[in-house]
Amino acid sequence: MSPFLKVFLIASALEIAVSFPQDSPPSLPFLPEIIDDFSGEKLPEQPLLKSVNENTCQIESSTFDSCILSKFREILPKLTVGVQEYNMPIADPYFYRKGIFRYANDGVQGGVLVRNMNIRGIADSRINSIRSNFKNINNFEVQVDGFLPRLIADGGFKADVKFGGLRLVPKGVFNVTVTNVKAIIKTTGSLMQTPHGQRLQLKTLDADVDVGNAKITANGIFSDRNLNTMILNLINENMPEITRTGIPATKAQWAPIVIQHINSFFANVPIDQIILQA
């Protein structure tokens, strides 16, 4: 399978949204770089309610992990409408405006654009277990074992890619569907004190991801419809190997994007209404 096809699919299937100005294609060669631009509708900042012990998870409690697990299971299905009591915005569907992924490796140089991407299925996530270690509020570790039945992402794309003596500048719309995703996610972070109360802020994220199945559809890769279909069939036939090798190979690039989105989501969430120190 050609390096270009692997790069194109990896960028799309991992939902690394990418873009560059349409009237000014990027100069080659590129250095690996991501520039992320995300947006999501935020709920207005709400006055903080007085903490109620029975509604919060006590960090020092022996039941803290099970308490947080229950909170996750309570909150996730509500992300389609937002969770007013915790000031959480709608996160399913999640709108991702744009970002930049630039790539230079194995004879491939270029950039791929994905813009105005909607991601659906987050609210159907299932959390199997949570294990935490709160050394203090400025240094905690959490491991989450989760399962995602199906995630769908669609948007527009444009690319400018060179490999060998060939240059491709495709553009069109795409849809990526992944199913039966298992993930073990390890994070570190802190509870930051702000004028509005404590806020969650992740520092690092590491994830072992196993994708059960994935499929991509797109137009505009080639102007000829039959050739476009043939290339997509080839990509989808090789999808298991591409996701198996591509996800860990690009972890250093997509993990900071995920952290940035999670921190943005929790920016207005009064975390001390969920987690409480004794």
Image (spheres, rainbow, N blue to C red):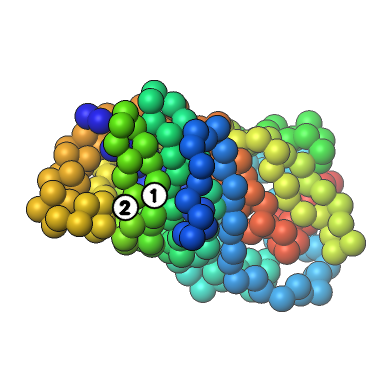
Q: Is residue 177 left or right of residue 14?
A: left
Residue depicted at x 73% and y 47%: 201
> As displayed, is residue 8 above or below residue 93?
above
Q: Is residue 95 left or right of residue 245?
A: right
State the residue in front, 159 or 36.
159
Q: Position of residue 16 (x, y in %)?
A: 47, 47
* The image quarter in which residue 199 lies: bottom right
Q: Position of residue 148 (x, y in %)?
A: 38, 48
Determine contact: label 2, label 1, CB under 8 Å.
yes
Q: Position of residue 17 (x, y in %)?
A: 48, 52
Q: Which residue is mark 1?
A: 159
State the residue in front, 151 or 252.
252
Bin the neighbour count of mark 1 within 10 Å (Cα to Cα): few under 14, some 14-19, many 20 and up: many
| Camera sees residue 23 | yes
Q: Which residue is mark 2?
A: 170
> As displayed, is residue 116 above or below residue 142?
below
Residue depicted at x 26% and y 51%: 221
Q: Position of residue 214 (x, y in %)?
A: 27, 45
Q: Secondary structure at mark 2?
A: loop
Residue type, mark 2 in image: Pro
State the residue in front, 198 or 37.
37
Residue depicted at x 38% and y 61%: 156
Residue lying at the far right in this picture: please name it: 195
Residue type, mark 1 in image: Ala
Q: What quarter of the picture does the N terminus occupy?
A: top left
> As displayed, is residue 184 above or below residue 214?
above
